[in-house]
Image (cartoon, rainbow, N blue to C red):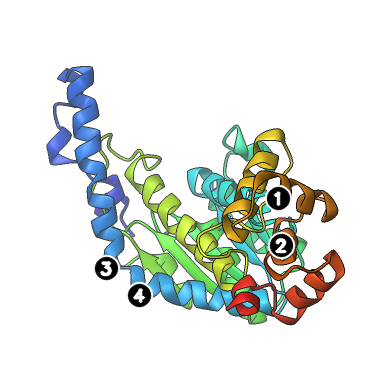
Amino acid sequence: MDLKSLTTEQQNQNSMNLDSLSVREILELMNEETKNIPLAIDSEIPGIVKIINATIDSLNKGGRLIYLGAGTSGRLGILDAVECVPTFSTDPDMVQGIIAGGEAAMMLAVEGAEDSKELGRQDLIDRNLSKDDVVVGIAASGRTPYVIGGLEYANEIGATTASVCCNKNAEISKYATFSTEIDAGPEVLTGSTRLKAGTSQKLVLNMISTASMIGIGKTYKNLMVDVKPTNQKLIERAKGIVMTAAECDYETAESALQKTEGNVKVAIVMVLCHIDVFEAKELLKKSDGFISKIVN
């Protein structure tokens, strides 16, 4: 595909005089252009739903959600993956982000890494990819060889494949069972896909991970009941969640969390059902981790 034909590489007619604008005018223009993103995502929601449903099915079978990308796209995948651990108490292997060039590429570009289809394939082989996993290829251009190589391998072994890109009729979509193409228009700074394209991808990844975690019982109502209280702020947040969910006072929430060694979900069930830790854990096991199935 000719690079100039990509929306993400075209000049934005609204920012042709970008270098002569005041700081305020630049910010107003950037903010105005960003408003296009939710509208562009709207039309792609049916496809995103399919990705999420497939991910929920995979996670319930013990599979994993694996993001694969290069540059900004790869970094966004890693960002979304690592946040699942403290937010939902997931095992670090459940949601993973892989970037072309490895960990070093998080800080500095690794020359040529994104151009290698074989490297994309090998990185998934190294993660012992299985047919129960979901691989989401992320590429603003929709044509990154590294990502295409990874998706090709994932398809070969029967894993579920999906793609998130920012150009219509993208090459990457041909290699994904479920594809999402978000065209929010050219960037304010021509070709700088860390801007609108990056924001578009972040919003979609937020949807995929959050809705998938809700789908496997990681929330109660709109509360993060599987949050991992690893610092003082999160310890206090955990107490607040127990207080809200179980409609109890601070002391009751604190006591319950001490008994469960910080397990918010078990603490909530204990207080709501007036039972001990063992009984709460048994109820959660029988309900596949859904508090709503216990109390409703």
State which tag comes first along the sequence, 1 or 4: 4
Dividing the picture into quadrants, the one containing residue 288 is bottom right
Q: Earlier in the sequence, mark 4 or mark 2?
A: 4
**Residue at numbered disc 2:** 271
**Mark 1–mark 4 distance (CA, rounded to whole Å):** 40 Å
Q: Position of residue 108 (x, y in %)?
A: 59, 32
**Res. 11 visible in picture:** no
Q: Which residue is mark 1?
A: 253
Residue at left offset 73%, top offset 55%: 92
Percent x, y of residue 46: 35, 75
Q: CA distance from mark 4 to mark 2?
A: 39 Å
**Callouts 1 and 2 close, C-beta under 8 Å:** yes
Indicate the quadrant where residue 280 lies.
bottom right
Graded by Cα atoms within 10 Å as few (under 14), some (14 to 19) or many (20 or more), the crowding at tag 3 reads few
Q: Nearer the viewer, mark 2 or mark 3?
A: 2
Circle 4 packing at 10 Å, graded few (<14), some (14-19), many (20+), is few
Kind of residue sitting beneath label 4: Pro
Q: CA distance from mark 1 to mark 3?
A: 43 Å
Q: Circle 3 sits in a helix, a strand or a loop, which is it?
A: loop
Distance between mark 2 and mark 3 Cα atoms = 43 Å
Return the mark for residue 43: 3
Q: Residue at x 52, y 47 (%)?
A: 76
Labels 2 and 3: the sequence-earlier one: 3
Q: Nearer the viewer, residue 240 or 22?
A: 240
In-image side of 155 versus 47 (left or right)? right
Image disc number at residue 46? 4
Q: Position of residue 200 (x, y in %)?
A: 37, 51
Q: Are marks 1 and 4 in contact (CB under 8 Å)?
A: no
Which secondary structure lies at badge 4?
helix
Crowdedness of circle 2 by 10 Å Cα count: few (<14), some, many (20+)?
A: many
